Image (cartoon, rainbow, N blue to C red):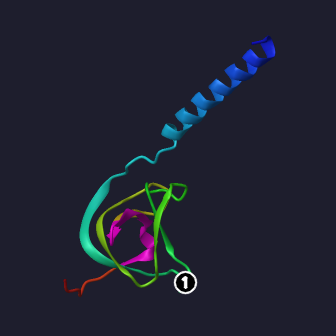
Amino acid sequence: MNKAQEKVLVATLCGIIITAAAGFAVQPTMAAGYTVDNMAQVTGVSQWDKLNVRKWPAGYSQKVGALKPGVHVWVERCIEVKNSADWCLVDRNGITGWVNSRFLTEVYDWDI
């Protein structure tokens, strides 16, 4: 291995380490939350669109599913995020993840 190849290898390894560290640094912090344990309906989403369900309570987080407008979801809890929208942990037919709370309307009159 010559000197140029060593430099490329070291630079590549440094890049991998920095990328891995950044992945942990940008994980959203869990803000103070409140338990909901109630049904809600997906609202405020165009009929041709879907509400993305995220792994973490952040718009840049990995998408784990999508919900059609009007469907009902179980809301486990929500969190308040400073200078941002609140996020709620929802479940619908095995899809569990976080959605922006502004797209949920609590359902008061529901039967199981």
Position of the C terminus by quadrant = bottom left
Q: Name the residue under label 1.
A: 46
Residue furthest front as drawn: 1
Measured as percent of width and height from the top left, residue 94 is found at 33, 67
Membership of 96 in magenta stretch: yes
Q: In this view, does 50 lie to the left or right of 36?
A: right
Magenta stretch prevailing secondary structure: strand
Q: In this view, does 72 lie to the left or right of 54?
A: left
State which region is magenta: 90-105
Image height check: is 22 above or below 13? below
Membership of 87 in magenta stretch: no
Measured as percent of width and height from the top left, residue 73 is found at 33, 75
Residue plotted at (76% across, 18% down): 5
Measured as percent of width and height from the top left, residue 64 is found at 45, 61
Image height check: is 72 above or below 33? below
Measured as percent of width and height from the top left, residue 15 is found at 65, 30
Residue plotted at (42% across, 46% down): 29
Position of the N terminus by quadrant = top right
